[in-house]
Amino acid sequence: MTDTRMYLGRPGLLAAIGSPRGSVEAPRQRRTSVFELGAGGFAIDQMIGGARTYTINYEQITRQNWATLQAYADGHEGPGPFAFLDPGQRNMLPANVSGATSVTNDSTNFAAVETPAADTFNRAVTSSGFGTSTSGHVWTASSVTGHYSTTGTTGQISTVTVNNLYYATVDTGCPDHTVSIDQTLPVLPTGAAITLRAVARWTDASNFYEALVTVATSGSTTLTIQKRTTAGGLVTVVAAATVGMHAAGNTWRIVLDVLGTTVRALTWNTSTGTAPTTWQASATDASLTTGNLAGVGCRRETSNSNGTVNILFDSFTATPTAMALGSSALYNDAGPRSLTWTFSNLDTLATSALTIDWPSSTFAYGVPVVSGRALCFSCYVRGGGADAIVTYTPRLYWRDAAGVLTGSITSGTPVVSSSGAWAQMLATATPPVGAVYADMDVHYTSGATIGSIGYFRRFLLNEGSTPDTLWTPGTGVWPVRVMALPEAWPYLSPELRTGPVLTMQEDTS
């Protein structure tokens, strides 16, 4: 421990407050209820979470130090809540994170983040397909490539031939993925409908799921989930919904999600409406379990008389669900469980990371930091499953008050896991200028194969540039509110305050 001071204030404006010559009391209360059983004896129920009440006992302080505390108590620093960094609580991570799932027996407060295949189409590719996407994934056209192009700002398919299915796909490396695309239809269909499509779990033109947005000549628009299988032959409708009206030039965002046997979709007219809050069509279907390709499509249906229509595409993403987080009792020593990261599929162009889902709605971007005060993030990893040798890199992210990255990411030394021993990883740095919060993750670097498992334990975020030798439990940095600050000054000494007690309560909402 290199800094024993206490810090209080708004995130980004934390200031050291006077240390008391008396004690700092910080009991953490977890509500417990005792029930008498009819057969005799008692049952005890205890809440999972808890909150601290801080009581800081000063024997005597100067008026200047008193004024600093009074500003928080009386509202001169705003209504709060405030951040309080207690040097007595070394591990600043939430309980279930520091305990590697031991508190809830699941991956609560952890999240798996994967970089999607993505395209903004901000390039010029003339009459030879969509080319290479923004994320580096190469598009494959399933029809005449000369009908595909990019305009410098959007992708474009020229629907020259009526009743011809135009599709373009990229490889996500995983049959579970979420596809999103904006499609602009510049006309109101005449003669017959025009359809806009997002496709998922595509193996070939005879095996895939799709979210089909059908725009009728009246402008009435419907959403359908369809599947095509080699065994089943023709397209089969598995779900449908009516979703709104179309006018020439309107843009539709289509989202299609496939995970296991669940297939669901939604769409909305971004020119006139807002995103739905629930899936509009969903189904359970086990016909297609493979197919790593995802993409977009469209068609002028039979009898459509618009002539060639140039349909525009933008803001494409296909996010793979290639990793799963869980809780295991296989390895333990700092709690009965460890966190597991299982690789189910791999996209060589995507990046995957184990992140923290911060439980505080007030400090949702991480732990509030103090300028010049170094932090160290560390944990241990061990390999297992199909291939135990995987390389991971711990990282610290520095975010501003709005949660935006300050442009600085601190990467630690990559660590290679093995099945025979635990390996410690760490990242440490002093917050850069503009940093208000510290966020962190464990980044998958290389080496995993399908079925690789990483086991993680002893998560720690401590003040200083090295990990504490002794791992300590974490209860998180929660916002606090000042509850009381009684005032008294001694005889003929108004420049002093006698026996003030600062009481603060954590707000874990």
Image (tube, grey):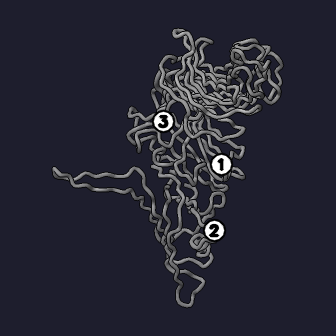
The relative height of residue 188 versus residue 77 in the rendered view (above or below) is: above
Tell me which label, 1 or 3, sits earlier in the chain: 1
SS assignment at label 3: strand
Q: Position of residue 228 (x, y in %)?
A: 57, 15
Between the C-alphas of marks 1 and 2, the distance is 22 Å
Disc 2 designates what residue? 77
SS assignment at label 1: loop
Disc 3 designates what residue? 456
Between the C-alphas of marks 1 and 3, the distance is 26 Å
Q: Are marks 1 and 2 in contact (CB under 8 Å)?
A: no
Residue 424 visible in the current orientation: yes
Residue 403: numbered disc: 1
| Number of the front mark, 2 or 3 | 2
The relative height of residue 426 versus residue 502 in the rendered view (above or below) is: above
Q: Residue at x 55, y 9 (%)?
A: 233
Q: Along the horizontal axis of the image, is 96 left or right of 190?
A: left
**Tag 1: Cα neighbours inside 10 Å, few (<14), some, or many (≥20)?**
some
